[in-house]
């Protein structure tokens, strides 16, 4: 039988895995995301043109146009006018209801109010404010 000899304990060495360079990791992540996110719809113009944000803003403008055409009287905040009042009201309603569609309609209302203020110096429905 062979004799056992006692060995001296060896130091334990822990090696961390070698990290790839930051630029290489980020470029790899971005390229993977880029490939996944488009999914075939990137080239179509209609996907961007008919996005929910734009459709909601157009619906807001359409609603305001229909209200003006029918001559509907709405209570307004003196400084904001009809379009601004509808924009602020629909913004707060959309926030409280967590409705993205109502928030996008608010964008439409507020855009019309800004247009009227820049073009005419007043906002329709507000007889006191002028720039």
Image (cartoon, grey):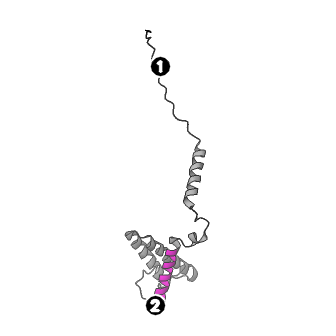
- 3 or 96: nearer the viewer: 3
Quadrant assignment for the N terminus: top left
The image quadrant that residue 86 belongs to is bottom left
Q: Is residue 56 magenta?
A: yes
Can you say whether 56 is above or below 128 in the image?
A: above
Is 13 located above or below residue 58 in the figure? above
Q: Nearer the viewer, residue 131 or 117?
A: 117
> Which is the main secondary structure of the residues drawn in magenta?
helix
Q: Badge 1, how many Cα within 10 Å: few under 14, some, many 20+?
A: few
Counting from the top left corner in percent of width and height, residue 73 is at: 42, 88
Direction front: furthest residue? 1
In the image, which disc is placed on residue 70?
Answer: 2
Which label was assigned to residue 10?
1
Q: Residue at x 41, y 76 (%)?
A: 89
> What's the residue at 47%, 80% (across, down)?
83
Mark 2 and mark 1 lie on one chain; the one further toward the N terminus is 1
Image height of 125 relative to 12, above or below: below
Location of residue 104 in the rendering, given as x and y in whole percent from the top left corner? 48, 72
In the rendered view, tell whether residue 82 sits above or below residue 96. Answer: below
Q: Residue furthest left?
A: 96
Q: At which x and y percent is residue 81?
A: 46, 81
**Residue 131 shows in this picture:** no
Q: Is 50 within the magenta?
A: no
At mark 2, the secondary structure is helix
The Cα atoms of the two marked residues, 2 and 1, are separated by 91 Å
Where's the C terminus, which quadrant?
bottom right
9 vs 99, nearest the viewer: 9
Magenta residue span = 55-69
Let me know if residue 88 appears in the view. yes
Secondary structure found at label 1: loop
The number of discs equals 2
């Amino acid at each position: 039988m062979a004799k056992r000899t006692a060995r001296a304990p060896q130091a334990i060495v822990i090696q961390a895995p070698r990290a790839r360079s930051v630029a290489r990791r980020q470029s790899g992540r971005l390229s993977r995301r880029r490939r996944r996110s488009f999914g075939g719809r990137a080239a179509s113009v209609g996907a961007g043109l008919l996005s929910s944000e734009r459709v909601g803003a157009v619906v807001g403008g359409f609603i305001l146009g229909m209200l003006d055409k029918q001559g509907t009287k709405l209570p307004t905040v003196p400084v904001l006018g009809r379009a601004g009042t509808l924009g602020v009201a629909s913004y707060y309603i959309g926030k409280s209801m967590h409705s993205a569609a109502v928030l996008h309609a608010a964008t439409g209302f507020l855009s019309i109010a800004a247009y009227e203020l820049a073009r005419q110096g007043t906002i329709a429905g507000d007889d006191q404010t002028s720039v």
